[in-house]
Image (cartoon, helix red, strand yellow):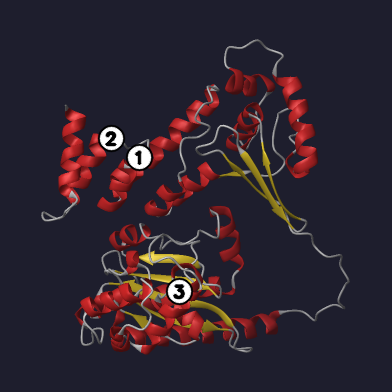
Amino acid sequence: MPSSWSSRREVSPENSRLLIERAHEELVGGNAGDARLGDVRPLVRESWRRSLALLVGAEGAPALDLSEDELEAYRSAHPLAGAMEMVRALLAPDADSGVIVAVGDAAGRLLWVEGDRHVRALTGDMGFVAGADWSERSVGTSAPGTALALDRSVQIHGAEHFNRLVQPWSCTAAPLHDPETRRLVGVIDVTGGADAATPQAQLLVDATARAIEGELLVARLRARAAAPAAPAPVRRAPVRAPERSVLRVLGRDRALLEVAGDTGESVTELSARHAEILLMLAVHRQGLSSERLSELVYGEEAEGTLRPEMVRLRKALERTAPHLVPTSRPYRLPVDLETDAHQVVSLLDRGAHRVALAAYRGRVLPESVAPGVEEFRDSVRGALREALLAEASADVLLAYADTDDGADDAEALRLALSMLPARSPKRAGVVARLERLDA
């Protein structure tokens, strides 16, 4: 990022923040005819109305469309992957630049989010992380989503965002096109304080977008020149989409196995024992010996119990998810099985603390006394707590304190209290809770 970035503050939003906030409240509250809406920029006003029509909530985190493995595979094959070095060279998001740079696909899913570490930690709380959906249909008015919706560069200032959680930030974004077909291939965005939405910022983002499109064309022409003559096309059988499975174990004693593929979707409720076995195989992807799996599931119980249970599990999976039927010696799943608990840990690793907390539906198989489940349950709870105490905002910490896991966590409450402004109306409630815990 150029060193003069933070000094360019020539333009601010056309209307005061208070006026825009009041207009937003009227529209969200159902008063679409309020006169104050006439003072909001037409581009923003129309985007707000699209957001309402799409039933976007005025608060809440965006959907995480891509798991960690899916994200890595998808972006490595994306046409914009080869342009990332150019993005870094032109925008150079330094560690203390005060801004972050994001590159997303044509659907509005963020693929790369880089830049100021402090800003990334704060914006991660609202779900501005790689893999998240930042289209208008997901979060409403924002620079990346609205730029894709309008197919033009866009700046959104603070309170102009539809989602209240995003209103502390300003951003500039420009769409990216295929240099030959001109179809949308993605979007580039700069997010930060007011400096991220100046005329100079828009010039820089637009110029970067054009440079990326030029680089895509040059790379394509070089590839064509180096490629040998193409052989005659070979007819191939259609490739069947792989099954995608998720084991939902958070806050549930009887896990749900969700399977989606080209043949449709299915949801199966598992017995408590089958849930424990399948979870252990999902956690230990390298496989487990019969003795070790028995220890993780049964603990000190008599040997010989596992084999008949595995037979019953295999028969159940053959009907609902044949691609997950375990192999033997060692017991191992033939494909990776994603769990909602692993998704929470992945969100924490990306800095999306608010999204991770919302996805944490409760403890892993809470009534299970299987040693392996208890160990995994404690590891997930510990990872969530440690990440929130280390990096989360006061609002996220208070939300954590409202969960079963955080209700008696005096350390989390004291940390939230230290982060709240001196005149925050939330301070009295936090002090009262701490006094009850200390009594």
Q: Residue at x 34, y 40 (%)?
A: 386
Element on which disc 2 rests = loop
Give how far across and how far down residue 123 sits, in percent. Answer: 34, 62
Q: Secondary structure at mark 1?
A: helix
- Measured in 3D between alpha carbons, the distance from the residue under mark 3 to the one under mark 1, in whole angstroms, is 35 Å
Of labels 3 and 1, earlier in sequence is 3
Labelled disc at residue 124: none
Q: Mark 2 is on which residue type?
A: Asp
| Mark 2 neighbour class, 10 Å CA radius: few under 14, some 14 to 19, many 20 or more | some
Q: Residue at x 35, y 86 (%)?
A: 202
Quadrant of res 402 = top left
Residue type, mark 3 in image? Leu
Q: Decide: is 156 above or below 253.
A: below
Does residue 317 appear left or right of residue 301 in this picture? right
For mark 3, does the 10 Å Cα neighbourhood hold few (<14), some (14 to 19), or many (20 or more) residues?
some
Q: Alpha-carbon distance for marks 2 and 1?
A: 10 Å
| Residue denoted by label 3 | 52
The three-letter amino acid code for the residue at tag 1 is Arg
Q: Is residue 281 left or right of residue 228?
A: left
Q: Is residue 230 above or below residue 385?
A: below
> What element does badge 3 sit on?
helix
Which quadrant of the structure image shows residue 301?
Answer: top right
Residue 237: x and y, percent?
A: 87, 65
**Which of label 3 and label 2 is nearer to you?**
3
Identify the image quadrant of residue 217.
bottom right
Q: Which residue is mark 1?
A: 385
- 185 and 265: which one is in front? 265
For the residue pair 56 and 206, the one nearer the viewer reads as 56
Eye-nearest disc, 3 or 1: 3
Q: Which mark is residue 409?
A: 2
Numbered circles on residues, count: 3
| Residue 204 horizontal/vertical position (percent) | 36, 85
